[in-house]
Image (cartoon, coloured by chain):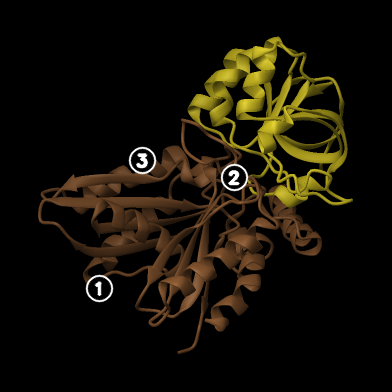
Chain colours: A brown, B yellow
Amino acid sequence: MQEYLDKIDDLVKLLLFTPTRAQDSLNVVHDACFKAILDNDMVVSSSLKLPLCQDTGVVTLFVGHDCLTKGQIETIKNCFQAQFNLFARPSMLSSPFIEQHSLEDMQMCFLEELRDVRGIGAIISGAGTEMHSFLKVYPGTSDFSTVKKDILTWVKERGALACPPVHISIAMGGTAAEACKQSKMGFLFGSNMPQSFEDEYDELVTSIKGLEVDPLGKRGNWVGNVFLRVLPTHISAVPVSMSFMCWPFRAEWMEIAS
Amino acid sequence: MLLSSGVWVKYTGEMGIARDRGLQKLIEEHQVLPSVLFFAGPTLKGNSKAPLGSCGPTSISRMLPFLPSCKDLGVRLIVSKGMSKDVLNVLQETNLAYGIAPGGAGAFYGVRIERVLKRKYEELGPEAFFLINVKEFPFYVFLGGEVDGYFEQIQ
């Protein structure tokens, strides 16, 4: 278990101050001033240990293992939370709507266990992207073009609100809950689809890249990566979920050798 | 000063920070608001260079119901992030100037805050109200208008 604990400090720093793929987002910034601000944001963040984005959001912690006990996983989670809360904004409340109180510096993370990989990772969900998540369950008689049309409409309406440059991850199949989870996991592990989907995927990416997704309303396209994850599905109910990732790309995965 | 649309400017002077519950309370209490209002929620874990910590813009879309009252209480320019048809419609109806700051640039904007002059509703944490002084605080003028203050165009 020690190898998991040893990675927590680096994981938190990567998430908050120096996300591995934030720099890649700048390739799709189409405005010099905007780019200069994001560039400078990264410099200030890493030098002063100020979170790159003030919305340190709600975190999902991923622990991939084949031998940890429940107690050990709880320890890993607690250590992560303690380290994260040193820098994070107190964004979380105890409950939605009723009898709310701030969790202050005792914010918790949600935990996902993975059994086919070894490592530790996390995804930050800020409100700017979370507000624009998509979930719809289609009848089994629907076709890809219907889903594509809905996705394009959603990205066109919402993409510019989700802190561009944005990255998009779509999951099709599974259950509604699994599709939501897999759409997030695309940001950690990338696309995962059968070869038969590749042409449709390419067309979908081309169409998304043709949309106006511009935070300054100048008709540009500020979309970076588009991931697609495909799962076996129910014969009559096909869930499709889509998540946005904001430009800092706060999704990190650190492998642990077996 | 008349702010022109479609240019980047940097602002030096006084501005308010508010959002969601804090903004709602200000309006319910009919507080006089500064002419420049930044929709943001700082981390509140600051240092000598960033008194409120990381402090980038939050989404204007959640604040749309409050914009007419903001105008009535003295606001002339909103700085925030996000643009959509709904946002544009409300801004045009209320005749407020709108500056877009890059979302996610919390550290950058955090160090543009020179001093915190006043704090209100601190029990709301990052949704509290702050009156601050900023120096060379850049944003893109999406909708221009007449706003008091020192603005410098970025070439």
The residue sitting at 46% across, 63% down in the picture is A187
Q: List the residue tagged with mark 3.
A: A153
Q: Amino acid at mark 2?
A: Leu
* Residue B99 in view, yes or no: no
Of the two numbered discs 1 and 2 on the same chain, state the one appearing first in sequence. Answer: 2
Q: Nearer the viewer, residue B58 or B148?
A: B58
Judging by the rendered image, the residue that carries numbered circle 1 is A195
Residue shown at the point (70%, 54%) measured from the top left = A38
Looking at the rendered image, the quarter that the C terminus of chain A falls into is: bottom left
Q: Is residue A96 visible?
A: yes
Crowd rating for badge 3 (residues with CA inside 10 Å; few <14, some 14–19, many 20+): some
Disc 1 packing (10 Å; few <14; some 14–19; many ≥20): few
The residue indicated by pointer 2 is A103
Nearest to the eye among marks 3 and 2: give it.
2
C-alpha distance separating marks 3 and 2: 36 Å
Determine the secondary structure under disc 3: helix
